[in-house]
Image (cartoon, grey):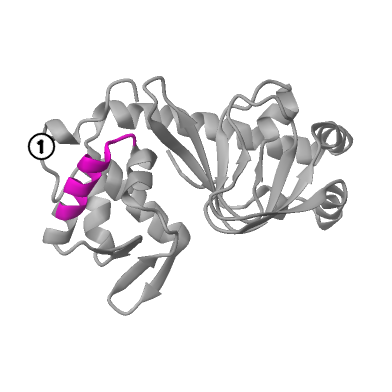
Amino acid sequence: MSLFGQDRSFLDALTPEDRRALLAEGAPRVYAPGTVMIRERDTSAYVLALLSGWAVVSVETERGARLILALRGAGEVVGDLAAVDQGPRSATVTALGRVDAVSVSGDRFRRFLAARPHATSLIMRQLSARLRSADVERRSLASETVLQRLAARLVELAQHAGSSRPGGTVLELPLPQHDLAAAIGATREAVAKALRQLREHGVVRTAQRRVVVTDTDALLALARGRGLRTAPGPAEKSPPGV
């Protein structure tokens, strides 16, 4: 499952005229780090078009654990599913840092889509891609070790939100270990153990809220079940029900 959206964001894929029309339908909003922008199971239907910053999309499992489904950045829209089907919110969206957005009511967003077939097609493709991604994630949780899943996430973060520096690729998103755990359906202890293995093999360096990838090829090999792969111990198994 990809934490990120498609290579081209919804706003970028719109024509300039449609993009201006959509943003003109809403009002600007600024969210401080840690602010809940959309809450799971809420009955609101507004859509947020993200202009800058990053937001975390997460759900709460039956056992009370948090599972991160996605990271959404500038150009993406969040809250569109509830606006389209008018059902309860399916996930919580939280500002990772400062987020600038435009809030569009559900009614206005539906009218926008109804008048613009191209925008409707983009939303349908987006929803389809997220469904396929969720299917891949279920297979991953059932068949891959924590080390594999963590390696895949770190590669993805390096590709989408990494900055090349001397000595490696710095992951610019400030994801603490409990968020990394929530992003792969594992416990914080299991992620700490996997990171320790990666450090010992010189694949990554870590500091508080910072990970530097020093060997991307090794991470890719791990994600594909080769190289440094180790047999999962009890602490590496995903918690039941996640």
Q: Position of residue 186 (x, y in %)?
A: 29, 36
Q: Residue furthest bottom?
A: 166
Q: Is residue 80 left or right of residue 224?
A: right
Quarter of the image for residue 94 reads: top right
Q: Position of residue 61 (x, y in %)?
A: 42, 24
Image quarter hosting the N terminus: top left
**Above-or-below relation of 3 to 127:** below
Q: Position of residue 169 (x, y in %)?
A: 35, 68
**Above-or-below relation of 105 to 158:** above
Reply yes or no: does residue 21 show up in magenta.
Answer: no
Q: Is residue 48 left or right of residue 240?
A: right
At x 56%, y 35%, the residue is 92
Image quarter hosting the C terminus: top left
**Magenta region, residue range:** 185-196
Q: Is residue 207 left or right of residue 175?
A: left
Predominant secondary structure, magenta span = helix
Q: Which residue is mark 1?
A: 231
Mark 1 burial class by Cα count in 10 Å: few <14, some 14-19, many 20+: few
Q: What's the amino acid at mark 1?
A: Ala
Q: Secondary structure at mark 1?
A: loop
At x 65%, y 26%, the residue is 42
Q: Is residue 154 left or right of residue 20?
A: left
**Above-or-below relation of 76 to 133:** below
At x 34%, y 54%, the residue is 155
Q: Position of residue 222 (x, y in %)?
A: 21, 48
